[in-house]
Amino acid sequence: MKHKSPLATVGIAVCLTVLTACGASTTTSSSSAPASSTTAGQATTAESTPQASTPQVSQGQDSITVSGVGNGEVGPLTLDQPYYIVKTTNASAADYGVLTVTVKGKELPTITSLAPEYTRVFQPPSPSVTFTIECPGAYTLQFTKPPALSTAVPAPKSFEGAGGTTVTGLVSTKGTYVKLSLEYKGQADPNAATGIMLVDAQIYDAVTGDSILNVPRYVNKAKTEDSDGRTTQKPGAYFLIVSSRSDADTWEAKITED
């Protein structure tokens, strides 16, 4: 799933998260919310925000979408999978508006995002979840169920992309070691700053949604390659979430067993 972002340079610095976080990748646009079929959960709006609208909840075949304007509370939502791939949109990002999503009863937010679009893994603390949402403008939250393990292709497998965020297809391993390798394919510049994350990637367990590496791998014009791996208890299936700052920041990512 590939999401184009008009704020190409926002990056990790303004897109924070505290998530307790098939051979080809799939792509969606910012208007790709699933068709509404039923209403799930209940929603109320914070009275302190006059312009706020009651959050609307729609149930798709494999996802739940919440949309609204301003501050509010939504739920309880039935989120009974081990994890969901959550995509947020924030219409107020251009005016530096922050979207904050917090599980009711928790002190720390689940998502804090200044980006127009943001994609990460969310692991529900329970099968029934109520969220408190704060946003100065319009927003959407789309919770997509995990992909079927039957779609996994064997490692090694490479993926390529540019601009926005890509959620790759599943890749399976036969052994007990998995490795993520990331390469910057845009215009290299050895004199460029080395700390800028023009492309970053994280690898996730397709069964649990756990991140495999402690920190994402990243590349840029000066640091064109990065990789890391981990020994696992058993063979598994994995996927990547790769974010690129602009169409010029092309990349190649690989899941391998060595």
Image: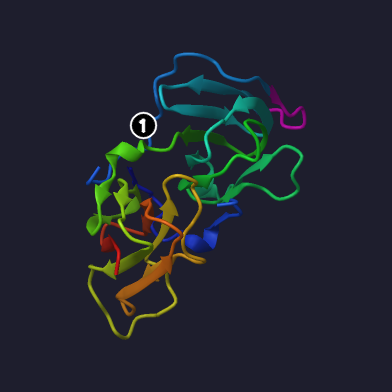
Residue drawn at 30 percent across, 56 percent down? 174
Q: Which residues are magenta?
A: 44-51
- Crowd class of label 1 (few under 14; some 14 to 19; many from 20; radius 10 Å): few
Viewer-nearest residue: 102 or 213: 213
Tell me where residue 144 appears, x and y as whole percent: 45, 34
Residue topped by disc 1: 32
- Answer with left or right where residue 6 lies relative to residue 24: right
Residue at 30% over, 45% down: 169
Q: On screen, 43 above or below 222?
A: above
Whether residue 220 is visible: no
Of residue 205 and residue 4, the one placed in the foreground of this image is 205
Task: Kindly report the secondary structure that dominates the magenta region of the rendered protein.
Answer: loop
**Percent coordinates x, y for residue 71 in the rendering:** 67, 34
Q: Residue at x 34, y 47 (%)?
A: 4
**Residue 195 or residue 24, whichever sits in front:** 24
Give amino acid for label 1.
Answer: Ser
Q: Position of residue 40 (x, y in %)?
A: 57, 19
